[in-house]
Amino acid sequence: MELGYLEPPFRGHVPGEPVVLATRTDNDRSLRLARRLGFVEVGRFEEFGGEQWYGVWSSNTATAPTV
C-alpha cells in the first residue's frame, strides 16, 4: 500500500489559505522539520525570552517534501 499527500495534512487548514508557524531559532530540529515540510521564513521576532522564527507554508508555492 502506498500513502501520500499532495499537501501536508494540517488539521483545520482551509485549502488555499497559508499556514503559519513559529519556533525558537535555537531549536534546530524544529527548524529543519519546518523547512523540510516546505515552510519559508518570513521573519524573526523576540518573544518568550528568545528569538523566534516565523514561517509560512502555502499550497500555491508548495513543493514536495524531500525524504
Image: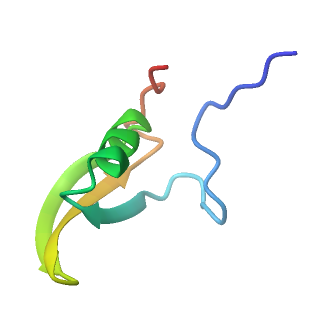
Instruction: Find residue 51 and report its image quarter.
Output: bottom left
Look at the picture and state if 63 lies above or below 22: above
What residue is shown at x 66% (from left), y 61% (from top)?
11
Q: Residue at left 38%, top 38%? A: 38
At which x and y percent is residue 14? 60, 61
| Residue 52, x across and y down, in percent | 19, 68
Residue situated in front as seen by the camera: 17 or 57 = 57
Q: Is residue 44 left or right of residue 33?
A: left
Q: Quadrant of the N terminus?
A: top right
- In front of the other: 57 or 53: 53
How many marks overall? Answer: 0
Question: Percent x, y for residue 39?
Answer: 35, 45
Farthest-out residue, bottom: 48
- Position of residue 29 relative to residue 6, above or below, is below
Left or right of residue 18: residue 15? right
User: Residue 2 at what x, y percent from top left?
Assistant: 80, 17
Classify 1 as above or below 38.
above
Q: Nearer the viewer, residue 45 or 64?
A: 45
8 horizontally vs 45: left or right: right
The residue at the point 44 percent across, 38 percent down is 37
**Residue ID at (18%, 82%):** 47
